[in-house]
Image (cartoon, rainbow, N blue to C red):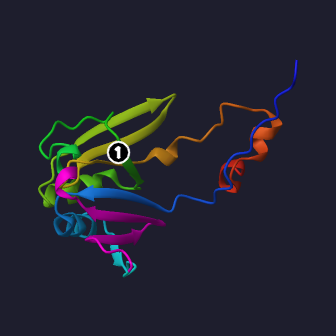
Amino acid sequence: MAVQKEKKTLPLKSLNHVSRVCRNVHITTRFYEKVLGFIPIVRPDALKFDGAWLHNYGISIHLLQAENQELSSLPPVEKEINSRDDHISFQSDSILGVEQALQEHGIKFTRKTIDENGVLIEQVFFHDPDGFMIEICTCENLPIQPLITTPSSICNLSPALSAR
């Protein structure tokens, strides 16, 4: 029986951006600026479609204006908040501050608390203007622990992860 050589993983450095298709890129841009604190950045002129690039917290968000045929694939704007929906998650040290800001902006949200062996994770979920789910959490309270403990998997961990 031939031993299969383990295939290499991609030589990645980090997450660069998350892209979202929007019903109205201007409304969604304003939401990500005013509610989440993102800052508009220069977008290449070579991109010949309506959109916006925003950056903060070490991550970029690329917002793209939906073409007519794409509108039907967007989630409904008014839908139930379901924490199991696809979402992007941001860290915060003040869930109370997050809730207060969401209330000031008139944004509906739901809050959950997870107790993992005495480690509390606070989560707040809400939708952006296009119906995409956003989570704000204290997830870094929970240590990242790899499931696989073979020497090869430990060597492939990022420096931040392997330092824990």
Residue at the spot x=37%, y=42% of the render? 122
**Residue 14 pos. (x, y %):** 58, 59
Q: Is residue 78 above or below residue 148?
A: below
Residue at the spot x=16%, y=56% of the render? 68
What segment is highlighted magenta in the picture?
A: 46-70
Q: Nearer the viewer, residue 82 or 10?
A: 10
**Residue 73 pos. (x, y %):** 23, 44
**Residue 116 pos. (x, y %):** 49, 30
Q: Is residue 122 above or below residue 25?
A: above
Q: In the picture, which quadrant includes the N terminus? A: top right
Numbered disc total: 1
Horizontal side of residue 37 vs 116, given as left or right: left
**Residue 25 pos. (x, y %):** 21, 66
Q: Look at label 1 and name its amino acid.
A: His
Residue at the spot x=15%, y=53% of the render? 107
Q: Is residue 98 above or below residue 29?
A: above
* Res 6 → quadrant: top right
Question: Taking the image as drawn, is residue 10 in sight?
Answer: yes
Find the residue positioned furthest to the top. 1
Q: Nearer the viewer, residue 20 or 73?
A: 73
Question: Taking the image as drawn, is residue 97 in sight?
Answer: no
* Res 47 → quadrant: bottom left
Q: Nearer the viewer, residue 141 or 19?
A: 19
Disc 1 packing (10 Å; few <14; some 14–19; many ≥20): some
Horizontal side of residue 147 vs 75, given as left or right: right
- Membership of 146 in magenta stretch: no
* Res 18 → quadrant: bottom left
Q: Nearer the viewer, residue 36 or 5?
A: 5
- Membership of 55 in magenta stretch: yes
Q: Which residue is mark 1?
A: 87
